[in-house]
Image: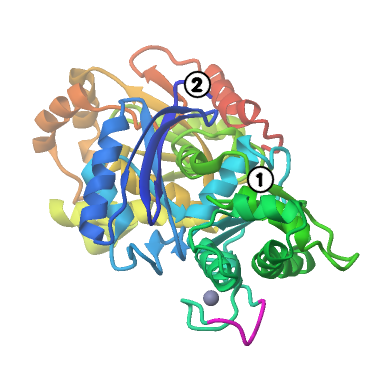
Amino acid sequence: MPDSAMAIGVDIGGTNLRAARISSHGEILEKVSEKSHPDPEIALARIVDLIRRVDRPAVKAIGIGIPGRVDQRQRQVLSGGYLDLSCVPVADHIEAATGRPVIIDNDCSMALMAEIAIGAARGHGNVVMFTIGTGIGGAISENGTIVRGSRAAGQLGHITVDRHGRECVCGRRGCVEAESSGTAWRRHVAEAGYAADTPVDQILALGERGDKEALAVLCAWAGPLRAAIDTISATLDPDMVLLGGGLGKAAERALAYAPAQAAWFQTSVRAAELADDAGVIGAGLAALSFPGAVSVHASAATGRSGKRAVLVNGIPAAGKSQMSKAISDRTGWPILTLDTIKNPFLEQLGGADREFNRTLGKASYQAIWSIVRDAPDGSTFIVDAWFGFQPLALLQKHLATAGVEHIAEIWCHAPGEVLAERYAARLHERPAGHPGAAYIPELIELSKKAEPTGLGPNHAVDTTTPIDFDAVTGWVNYVLCDGHGDTAHE
Ligand SMILES: [Zn+2]
């Protein structure tokens, strides 16, 4: 994929809000930050400001990592802490403010994706991460894909390590977050008679010299974390457990004083590598792997074939149906068009006014992506539509919901006068309800400013010249199959 593809990654924390422009290789091109705030309105305004500071025309999408329970598929924040965004449609808000498609996910899931792509877990697919900060976050990757369960799996800070332990924010007792977080560290050192702000490194240094009180504090803090890691080891048996967040490295060192006891549970534990940058890098990579942005190494590493769509795009009368049919004849891939779904309704209803025609168009658009969604993994569809009739963000949402991972776009175009002639010539073939001859001047105007979606590799075809359909089909095959290392195609 082109190296010029970029995204913006945002990491929302209780202390800091961070945003960075990220390349498709996960490099940080520009980074800014700002203090966090407990008021959602103020925090969101600061986030929008940060995004604007690093935004560039080449940015394809925005990824946002949010602490707590996040339903990535439904784009909903389910719970919050210091900054509670559970009552706010974060993705819709940022999309409206920036005009860019937005993907949201749990902050630790974002960090884990970054560590798998370019950090401590490079080359591994089965990885579990704990982020140790004010609280404890968690994320699970299986074969390179984040495990989500029904909505928001991976809340590893709430693994029970002591049923009679301290109260946790979740309402239960003895969660590992209540024993091994940064907040818990301050309590452990204070209880041992040290100043509450004594850093872990200082106690680790004392522990290395054999100081008994220091060792007791380290065991009290790291022991419950070891128990949680053993539970992960027993339930998920990952390639490795990563410890990230502000105290990840310190926790990894402290675990030396609370070694795994059972031979069954000996999962390797490593400190994460990307430190504070993991969140923004992972969020940027997630945005780039969002269907319609571009595919990145992280998504390529998952080994999942996903679904593919050929977007045959162009305004009415641009020559899309001839193009779709030619590609379908050569590949066997089915064609989905708005008219295929819409026309039977118009026929049954005996026509419709322009407004109702538009409503049918929107419903047909939705129906197309529902068909793709229900098709098996690995399917390829040719979707013939004027994609500009609906917002780009909606298309990206449809692509994501439908599980489309690779797209190729064919942009059919012709001069306005040719379109007008073609449109006029086929007016009699169209069922009542389609806009009539009165639409022609609008069509000519539209032809001057219409553009392809730009969501993926794009091949423009002037449909007034002779078209080499074999060459076009070859290009589509290259982009959808060879270009992404896919093997299975019809
Ligand atoms: Zn809890």
Judge depth for marks 2 and 1 and give the one in front.
2
Residue drawn at 48 percent across, 83 percent down: 171
Q: How many marks?
A: 2
Q: Secondary structure at mark 1?
A: loop
Taking depth in this image into account, of 142 and 160 the one nearest to the observer is 160
User: Does 444 lie within the magenta span?
Assistant: no
Residue 181: x and y in percent read 55, 64
Q: Amino acid at mark 1?
A: Arg
Q: Quadrant of residue 346?
A: bottom left
Residue 452: x and y in percent read 33, 28
The residue to which callout 1 is attached is 304
Q: In the rendered view, does 132 fall on the left or right side of 292?
A: right
Taking depth in this image into account, of 466 and 415 the one nearest to the observer is 415
- Determine the residue located farthest toward the top in the rendered image: 465
Taking depth in this image into account, of 342 and 245 the one nearest to the observer is 245
Residue drawn at 51 percent across, 78 percent down: 168
Identify whether 77 is placed above or below 456.
Answer: below
Category of crowding for the residue at label 1, using alpha-carbon neighbours closer than 10 angstroms: few (below 14), some (14–19), many (at least 20):
some
- Determine the residue located farthest toward the bottom in the rendered image: 164
The residue to which callout 2 is attached is 3
